[in-house]
Amino acid sequence: MGRPRSPLLDTDRIAAAAMSAIDERGMFTMPGLARDLGVAVSSLYHHVSGRDQILEMVRGTLLNTQLSGIDDDAPWQETLRRWVCEYRDVFGSHPELVRLLTAQTVSNPGIVSLYDRISKLLEDNGFRVESILHVITLLDDFALGAALDMAAPDVVWDTSGLPADAPLARAAAAVPSGRQRADGAFELGLDIVIAGLERFRDAGLDTSRGAAGSGAGSSLGSDVESGMPTRR
């Protein structure tokens, strides 16, 4: 029997084709993906259950191969900093994926395992269990927002209509534009996030909200005296 004219279909090829389609068109459909791969739509369903599974395959392909993992021997601050930097770089190269992947449940086994490692890292280093998911969400939100900022235009704020001495005009003129601006904002933000997490952990702040106005289980009131803003 002769060899097939094209490589056999497998999940790696499907994930790679989906990623290319998302980068180029912002989305993919099963018929469109089949056309890109030169196969019938029914052939795709021999390998995957549908679009959601393909998106999770893409998530796994990106993060399992491009993140260095969790170093249990390094300080937790250093580990989280490296993870957020890598996370931003990965999605900064594929900004269209952010909208698609944040709209569905994380189910890729490798990624779930990665987040479990992060949860253990936080718990082992003194974060209360009820705060861990909030901390992870905060880190995700910051990294993904920073990834999208990498695709922002060189000039984010058009200050041409403002006086030259207007605060925003002076602020925009004081920093580089383009990627340098995005990198500077990211580095400042990450410093603030890590420092805030250190303070949060050391103070044992409670993330539960409880009854409105009760103040139960929260030490946020002490932030007023220290000059830290309270949540509204």
Image (cartoon, helix red, strand yellow):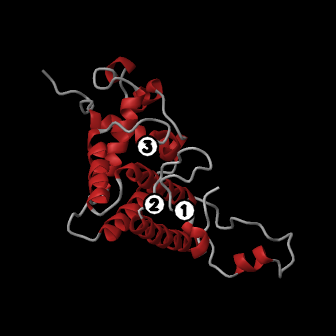
Q: Mark 3 points at which residue?
A: 20
4 sits to left or right of 208: left
Question: What is the spatial separation of the Cα atoms under label 1 and label 2, in whole angstroms?
Answer: 7 Å
Q: Which residue is drawn at 83% across and 80% down?
A: 164
Rendered location of residue 48, percent (x, y): 32, 26
Asked whether disc 3 touches disc 1, contact meaning CB atoms under 8 Å apart, the reply is no
Count of all numbered marks drawn on residues in the image: 3
Q: Residue 220 carries which label?
A: 1
- Dot 3: within a 10 Å radius of its alpha carbon, few (fewer than 14), some, or many (20 or more) residues? some
Rendered location of residue 192, percent (x, y): 50, 71
Quadrant including the N terminus? top left
Question: What is the spatial separation of the Cα atoms under label 3 and label 1, in whole angstroms?
Answer: 46 Å
Judge depth for marks 3 and 1 and give the one in front.
Answer: 1
Q: Residue at x 43, y 65 (%)?
A: 197
Q: Secondary structure beneath disc 3? A: helix
Q: Mark 2 points at which residue?
A: 205
| Type of amino acid at the residue the image marks with label 2 | Leu
43 sits to left or right of 152: left
